[in-house]
Amino acid sequence: MSLSRYFESHKADALRTGLSYFVTNGLAAALGLLLISGSVHLLFGSFAAAAASVGVLVCIPPDQPAPKRGKFWQLLPALLIGLPLFLAVQVLHADPIWLGLLLVPASFLAFLAGAWGKRGLPIAISAMFAMIFSMAIPTHSSIATTLSSGLYFTVGGVAYLIWATLANAALNRRYRVQMLADTLLALVQLMRTQARQFTSATGAQSGGEAPLIGALLRQQATLADQLQTARNILLESPRTLRRQQLASMLMLVLEIRDHLLVCELDLDTLKAHAGHAPTLGTLSDVLKTLADGIEGLADALLRGRQPPPFISQRARLTDLRWVSDTTAPSNGVEPPPGILARGLASRIGHLNDEACKMIALARGELAPDVGLVRTTWALFVSPTAWSWQPVAALWSWQAPSMRHAIRAALAIGTAYALALALPWGTHDYWILLTIVVVLRGSLAQTLERRNSRVIGTLIGCLLAGLLLYIHISPLVLLVVVTLAQAFAHAFAVRRYLVTAVAATVMGLLQVHMLNAGTSASFDVLERIADTLMGVSIAWAFSYVLPSWERHQIAALVTRTLAAQARHAQVALDLWQLNAVDNEPELQWRLARREAYDSLSALVQATQRSLSEPRAVRPPLEPLGKMLAYSYQLLGQLTSVKTMLLRRRGRLTHDQVDAPLRQSGVSLVNILTGPRLPCAEATHFATVDEPPELNDPFEGDLSTWLLRRLDLAADIADQLRNHADQVIFDLAQAQNR
């Protein structure tokens, strides 16, 4: 890549980041903090503003782009839990022993919120912020002063809840566009990686090696997570035409993802025939062109512009099918490579059609599928109500949330004792704050945050020192602090290094503004020292009662098998062909989502395990092959589903109905039933003499559907074998 293209690429990435939903959310949060703390300062003074600011900061962590429905109730637990903890620290701050006796059990209870997953972790952070930032407020012996600080804390928290709810509603239209654009960019990455697969070395697909288990699996998992986040906002109340357009475009993303998966089928067979390398190269170029078109659509959405028209690539694909060799020798059972090349080109054609539809929707040239959007939105939006169900799984010694809560409480207690023993101790809460933001439930996440925190602190100290050295005005300092808060919140999940830099700048500048007489250089040195001690403690305690990924891999493997079996059962069910409503379609979409989500969770756990000691890692080789076969099975079943939905008129139902019915039952048995000897395994689509494969572009598709069912059976058997091997190896390791 030339230097100019390199800078152009990074410039485009920087612009996309600046226009993203998480930066918009960060700016909204920072503006709320500025308005609320500034108003309280003008009305009641600096002490009231400090307490109100803590109330705001406690409510900020769970403030993420969300559906309008339930937004206030999503934020309310942060205030309800944070207020009593804030007051308790204010009362006990003058007595270090009693304060320590509060911090340890309160930290344990706060981190139990991790049982609620992505929704619970921000609440745990909020609870810890309430105690730690309360330590930063000057103490007073008067009960009246303590109550007044609690009142100002409440004022700040309530004001921010109202602000965040209104801001989320006001930005809802913008969030919908940004969420879709971010999802499209994730899809573009996957498409380009798939395009590289067409011209890569042979063998990666079947062996589950680097390309598949690496970039493709990570990007599939990333896209699955991003899709669920986008669904929650884009599919909420799609009443207006614009909302229906965006929701329909999101549904097309799901279709494109399926077509991409089907493009993996037969790819290694084609790579083995050198004569088809030019064809694969052209197909790769077409796929890259489609990715460029979708990337242009994402950029246009972010910039509020109409996307440029997109030229269909069908002509190039038609020429390819015409020049492909369909006369190569064949035994009648295995298709000639020319037929496979035409089939792959056909799948790229489906991708082309969906991309054209998506861009036409964005340009207003195509009406959205209102019926599909209206009937599916409620099923695919995550619930907003809080449930007590996660509590039932907490009270086990092996529960990851329980072990992490104990680990975090011990780390906080150790850090607090160390802070009391330090000779300076002017900002004892800095060590505690470092532990709260660095220590995570998995070693991989802790190590990533450890490194980012140290590097970010050093960079932030340099930036803050430079700003203080040049003596900028108080107004400029206030603007910088506000922007630092925006970036600290915006990148907390996306790129923690940026958050660490911004938080350091914000903390040092706030200390300088509140205590103008103190030495700025000493604050910088203290911040660096406290950060190094904090990350060291967090790193050390990540090995205390560790929740190694292998402890949850077995459950994730079981979930994946069940999801694959359910998807196979629904995808091959014959009632979808004769149904008069869209109930079968909804059931299939739900089963498909669970299949992708279960694989995403398993991929992420596998990736995290790579940072753990070798002695405690799960069996990576059978796990990687299981993941590879899982996606291959999804691809085969998606191909069958496409034939049933789009080509049912070219199927001989007397020939395929019985195998379809049998295959659904057989795949469920293979994936989730008791293991049978190989001789008893059922190959439901085969007959005494395998049917000769005809030209699928001219005649009946029944023999091709039967071939897909046979391949699905073989893949399911391999998938189950590797899954059983993973579970067996985990059990053996557990017994050692």
Image: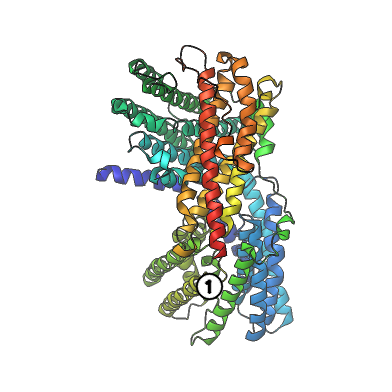
Mark 1 = which residue? 541
Q: Position of residue 199 (x, y in %)?
A: 33, 34
- Residue 593, horizontal then vertical, whole percent: 60, 39
Within 10 angstroms of label 1, few (less than 14), some, or many (20 or more) residues?
many
520 vs 557, nearest the viewer: 557
Q: Give amino acid for label 1.
A: Phe
Counting from the top left corner in percent of width and height, residue 655 is at: 59, 17
**Is residue 493 visible to the viewer in this orientation of the structure?**
yes
466 w.r.t. 391: above or below: below
- Left or right: 319 with respect to 415? left
In the image shown, does 42 or 536 lie closer to the viewer? Answer: 536
Q: Residue at x 65, y 39 (%)?
A: 380
- Along the line of sight, the residue nearer the viewer: 277 or 55: 277
**Residue 395's image quarter?**
bottom right
Q: Position of residue 722 (x, y in %)?
A: 51, 46
Q: Is residue 414 above or below residue 257?
A: below
Total labels: the figure holds 1
Residue occupying the point 67% across, 75% down: 105
**In this rendering, position of residue 543 left or right of residue 292:** right
Answer whether residue 494 is visible to the viewer in this image: no
Image quarter where the C terminus lies is bottom right
